[in-house]
Image: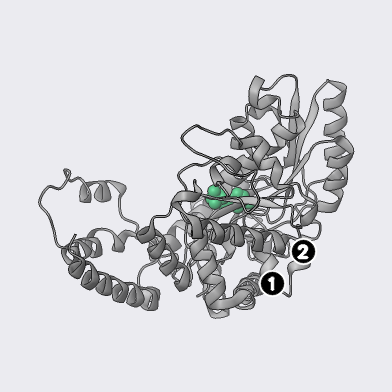
């Protein structure tokens, strides 16, 4: 490798990235190109003729960047992928250069100390004490899986990890769960039919009476509770379950209490709004994704565990080729003995650099700004008789819809999809559609440093105009 070329190309690339971040607003947020065009663009044999790094950058500028979804664009308010903060971007670059492998201490001594510290910070934010531990993961999906595996091992007194699951067990969660809970229930060997997806109230919180009823019914049939999963920031609406009550029931039933705060965990950084997560510290394990509302670049999820030793009990298989000194004082901490992954990216560096560069208060202000933007959109919506908002947003996620009594439910579903597709095509905004209690909504979620109140004004004006135009057309067609 020619390091002079690397140096020059690296400077050029950083210049390019800085310009990209500053000017991204002028790009179409989403390029509605046919997937086959992209497959053709990359329909190339394994290259064998060396290209210069600058030449490769030019190729990327032509073939890759124009077809990216620009999550840094202020109009990006879609699936929960933040605009990454600049310090975090540099952190990931350095992590790749150092290529520390967090699986084993000997390939990552100082990185292990940093990773443990970042986990400690997350545990402090939750309100856990010194006994707590955790793992940084690829994301919330993997963190929820680990949380459910800990639940299985705790509740079966570590038998299931040797003998497999014996007897009937069930996991309880609200219908507003993320699909990662379904996948985790499958992956720990329980079977998805043993997931009880329970109804929610008008605030989209798990109904305690529905939980009690399901527990009674299962117990009468000989099925025991393995875990209650609380949601602290649902994907659709940022709703938060009654965590204190769920904890109380989990203790009474002798089962594990896991909380999915993959998205909502960002509220812990907010001085204004953090009380919304009241009771989070009572959970046995918690999922929080710094790559969501801490504005860290992908990937960095986290599973935080109230009692660190549960991790060791659940994952502490040691291989002869990996020595562990965890019984010594001042131990060499081996993540592979206390977690699922072995080779492990140095995920904490970008989070550590983000906190060092901006400070917790600033990151919390970004969170508060996003909450205020969702609240502002809610106010615009409730002042327009043609629109409704599912509920007053507690976080940045808000679901709104166009109402029209002349149109059937199916036609309205089509209308929402058509309007979202039209907006996607234009490239000024991107958001998703979703279903809540059987009807279709626009699901809008700014987890974005660049979004402003003006962006929300412009978005709502566009929605008002396009929904009316679509309704006119549909009435004519009817
Ligand atoms: C509440 C919740 N849990 C878990 C996940 C999964 O997280 P990831 O995409 O990081 O795997 C998401 C993703 O949006 C989520 O909203």
Residue 170 can be seen in this image: yes
Q: Are marks 2 and 1 in contact (CB under 8 Å)?
A: no
Image coordinates of residue 234 in percent, x first then y, are 67, 53
User: Where does label 2 land, which residue?
Assistant: 276
Residue 473 can be seen in this image: no
Mark 2 or 1 closer to N-term?
1
Protein image colouring:
one colour
Side of 204 relative to 457 (left or right):
right
Side of 2 relative to 190 (left or right):
left
How many numbered discs sit on the rendered protein?
A: 2
- Asked if disc 2 is less than 8 Å from ligand 1, the answer is no
* Residue closer to the observer: 311 or 25: 311
Q: Quadrant of the N terminus?
A: bottom left
- Asked if disc 1 is less than 8 Å from ligand 1, the answer is no
* Residue closer to the observer: 398 or 133: 133
User: Where does label 1 land, which residue?
Assistant: 270
**Crowd around label 2: few <14 · some 14–19 · many ≥20 (10 Å):** some
Side of 272 relative to 348 (left or right):
right
Q: Which mark is on residue 437?
A: none
Q: Which residue sits at x=22%, y=69%?
A: 9
Q: For the residues marked 2 and 1, what is the alpha-carbon distance in whole angstroms?
A: 10 Å
Image coordinates of residue 10 in percent, x first then y, are 27, 70
The image shows residue 478, relative to residue 352, as above or below, that is above
Task: Kindly state the secondary structure of the residue where label 1 is placed.
Answer: loop
Question: Picture quarter containing residue 382?
Answer: bottom right
* Residue closer to the observer: 295 or 418: 295
Question: Picture quarter containing residue 464?
Answer: bottom right
**Crowd around label 1: few <14 · some 14–19 · many ≥20 (10 Å):** many
Side of 317 relative to 375 (left or right):
left
Q: Which residue sits at x=57%, y=60%?
A: 290
């Amino acid at each position: 490798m020619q390091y002079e070329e690397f140096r020059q190309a690296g400077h050029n690339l950083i210049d390019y990235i800085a310009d990209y971040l500053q000017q991204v607003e002028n790009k179409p947020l989403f390029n509605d190109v046919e997937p086959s065009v992209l497959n053709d663009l990359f329909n190339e044999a394994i290259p064998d003729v060396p290209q210069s790094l600058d030449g490769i950058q030019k190729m990327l500028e032509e073939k890759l960047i124009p077809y990216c979804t620009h999550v840094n664009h202020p109009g990006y308010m879609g699936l929960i992928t933040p605009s990454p903060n600049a310090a975090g971007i540099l952190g990931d670059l350095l992590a790749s250069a150092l290529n520390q492998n967090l699986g084993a201490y000997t390939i990552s001594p100082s990185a292990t100390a940093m990773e443990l510290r970042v986990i400690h910070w997350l545990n402090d934010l939750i309100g856990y004490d010194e006994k707590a531990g955790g793992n940084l993961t690829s994301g919330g999906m993997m963190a929820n899986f680990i949380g459910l595996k800990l639940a299985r091992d705790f509740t079966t007194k570590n038998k299931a990890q040797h003998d497999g699951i014996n007897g009937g067990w069930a996991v309880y969660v609200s219908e507003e769960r993320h699909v990662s809970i379904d996948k985790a229930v499958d992956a720990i060997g329980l079977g998805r039919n043993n997931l009880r997806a329970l109804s929610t109230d008008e605030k989209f919180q798990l109904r305690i009476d529905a939980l009690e009823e399901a527990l009674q019914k299962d117990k009468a049939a000989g099925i025991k509770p393995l875990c209650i999963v609380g949601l602290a920031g649902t994907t659709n609406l940022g709703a938060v379950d009654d965590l204190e009550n769920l904890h109380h029931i989990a203790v009474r039933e002798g089962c594990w209490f896991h909380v999915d705060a993959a998205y909502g965990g960002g509220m812990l950084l907010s001085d204004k709004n953090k009380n919304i997560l009241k009771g989070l510290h009572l959970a046995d394990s918690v999922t929080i994704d710094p790559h969501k509302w801490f504005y860290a670049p992908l990937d960095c999820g986290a599973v935080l565990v109230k009692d660190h030793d549960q991790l060791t009990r659940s994952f502490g298989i040691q291989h002869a080729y990996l020595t562990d000194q965890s019984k010594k004082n001042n131990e060499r901490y081996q993540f592979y003995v206390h977690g699922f992954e072995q080779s492990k990216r140095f995920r904490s560096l970008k989070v550590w650099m983000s906190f060092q560069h901006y400070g917790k208060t600033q990151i919390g202000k970004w969170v508060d700004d996003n909450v205020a933007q969702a609240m502002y959109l809610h106010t615009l919506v409730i002042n327009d008789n043609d629109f409704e908002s599912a509920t007053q947003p507690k976080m940045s996620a808000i679901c709104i819809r166009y109402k029209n009594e002349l149109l059937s439910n199916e036609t309205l579903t089509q209308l929402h999809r058509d309007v979202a597709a039209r907006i996607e095509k234009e490239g000024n905004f991107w958001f998703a559609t979703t279903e809540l209690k059987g009807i279709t909504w626009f699901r809008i979620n700014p987890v974005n440093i660049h979004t402003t109140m003006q962006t929300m004004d412009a978005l709502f004006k566009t929605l008002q105009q396009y929904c009316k135009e679509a309704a006119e057309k549909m009435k004519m067609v009817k």
